[in-house]
Amino acid sequence: MYYIGIDIGGTNIKAGIVTEDAKVLIKDKIRTGAERDYTEIVADMAELCNRLVEQSNLSWDDIDSVGIGSPGIVDGKNGVIVFAGNLSFRNAPIGAELKKHINKPVYMGNDANCAAVGEYIAAGKKDMECYVFVTLGTGVGGGAVINGKLFAGFNNVGMEVGHIAMHPGGSRVCTCGRRGCWETYASVTALVAATKKSIAAHPDGMMAKLAEENGKVDGRIAFNAARAGDEEGMAVVNTWIENVAGGIVDLVNLLAPEQLSIGGAISNEGDFLLEPIRKIVKRDQFARNVPETEVVIASLGNDAGLIGAALLGKAQ
Amino acid sequence: MYYIGIDIGGTNIKAGIVTEDAKVLIKDKIRTGAERDYTEIVADMAELCNRLVEQSNLSWDDIDSVGIGSPGIVDGKNGVIVFAGNLSFRNAPIGAELKKHINKPVYMGNDANCAAVGEYIAAGKKDMECYVFVTLGTGVGGGAVINGKLFAGFNNVGMEVGHIAMHPGGSRVCTCGRRGCWETYASVTALVAATKKSIAAHPDGMMAKLAEENGKVDGRIAFNAARAGDEEGMAVVNTWIENVAGGIVDLVNLLAPEQLSIGGAISNEGDFLLEPIRKIVKRDQFARNVPETEVVIASLGNDAGLIGAALLGKAQ
């Protein structure tokens, strides 16, 4: 069987056909046109799905189900996008609407939660009691699969991992309104801010040069400088990694997952990111003399959300 | 049917017969004699159970199962106490040993997790997707029931709620070795330390007087002073409650439970404790425009662990 995943974004809607073992057979995208009524958007989504099935020489009989990932708050049980900031969806019954076009089971979830499901299935360890995914990007997101089921809390806003407090009441105000959320310390946004601050303090340093060559400051500048032995680069990276690891220790102490994987583009830094995190987790975790959480880099990259949406039905 | 719960402590072993709806029919206790071999301790536990069944005019046919709660790390699946600091148990197969004496299903769990199960069942909302229990005492413990099952992580050390970081790397060193754990801010131990500090700074203040009358400084001194309008008392209580609430917001943002209940003797402070916590949760939680977690005071008091141990079989 094959599985169709749809990943709704503010600009594009991506869709793809995914195999049982989390590989993308074919994928394509269309413009979202987020200002339109949801019924029009869903009609386009259905057309995209039909096109993909045709182009891959499959029939709808080969398709098990369709899964939809969306930013914001998604009520998977009722197939409703409750709220999605940049999409103007408010309590939109996307699931029921799509079923008017496609006679297949439709599953829905928050995009970070979908990515968690994708990475969980790609990890290939189906008997995990608990699996946790963390994605480091503009913010910090994540998801969990507990006893084989996507866990999103009773109101579908659980696993807001970015919004556990690192320094509650501290000086960093989070987009959620709270002070000191982990996201304000561990996002790539925070890494870039720290890099910029260091560049301002050391305008002739290596990071300043790398940023000039690169045309902008992104998350890689500090890592590239640190790899080259630059002291300021190492300072920025070490502080950021300590903050990333601090929240991961919290998740390990709370959820004790068999595996916790780290995604987002910054996870391309690989062992240079992973090894110090592992050391800090080892140092700070509560677990002693028991099997320990395996912390790894996530494997699916950009397609995690699409693949996870497709395979949502496997984590219900 | 009736359910036997056994609550192992360093000094005493308590046991009781519990009804379907979380009421204690009869209970008693014996000395633990923690220095002895586990086989001897289990033999005494079995004898205590037999005595309770006899005294309550029940027969073993009326007993559904026996549950055991223990401090430390408990492998419920295999019926083993992996580690319990003040009990000298190391990988002790207590479950199998008890079954040599009592031919009933035996369930086992960590004591805080048992209390969570007890409070979950006492809450009487069996369809909760997620329920979280937090107990404030010498440390901060807790547990969760997810989709009707006790959740303890894959290695049985999950839900160490006291060991999420409030100020990681901060000046307060936790018993677990990490710096800045929530427990170092939100335990009654932390409340008492803050009370003592304030008394030292204000030796003629109300808290100093209350402590002298009381013969010692405990968690109630600051609350009693605060209730009477004492400024220093209010300052101590407010800071402590802000710290307690901060961790509760973390749990709400991560686990989005239908209900989170607060136990431990200090929860007798009731609304004076609960109302400010609710306000802070309301202010700081990520959830907006969705159903919100209900934060309540736990209902079972000291018997939570015993009752939860008895009813462990209902949360497997």
Image (spheres, coloured by chain):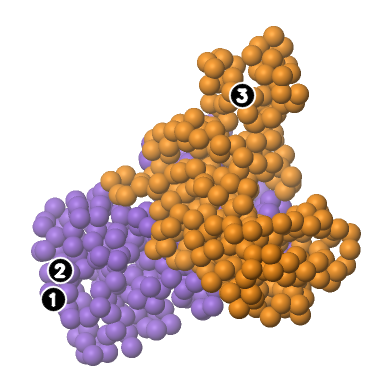
Chain colours: A purple, B orange
Residue shown at 77% from the left, 69% from the top: B47
Of all residues, the one furthest to the top in this rendering is B204
Which numbered disc covers residue B222? 3
Q: How many marks?
A: 3
Q: Secondary structure at mark 2?
A: helix
B117 up-or-down from A243: above or below: below
The answer, for residue B56, to whether it is visible in the render is yes
- Image quadrant for the C terminus of chain A? bottom left
Question: How packed is label 2: few (under 14 Cα within 10 Å), some, or many (20 or more)?
Answer: some
Front residue of A37 and A236: A37
**Tag 1 and tag 2, C-beta contact below 8 Å:** yes
Q: What amino acid is found at the position of numbered circle 3 in the picture? A: Ala
User: Image check: B22 left or right of A43?
Assistant: right
Front residue of A138 and B264: B264
Q: What amino acid is found at the position of numbered circle 1 in the picture? A: His
Q: Secondary structure at mark 3?
A: helix
Residue shown at 69% from the left, 41% from the top: B138
Name the residue that disc number 1 marks.
A101
Q: Are marks 2 and 3 on the same chain?
A: no
Which numbered disc covers residue A97? 2
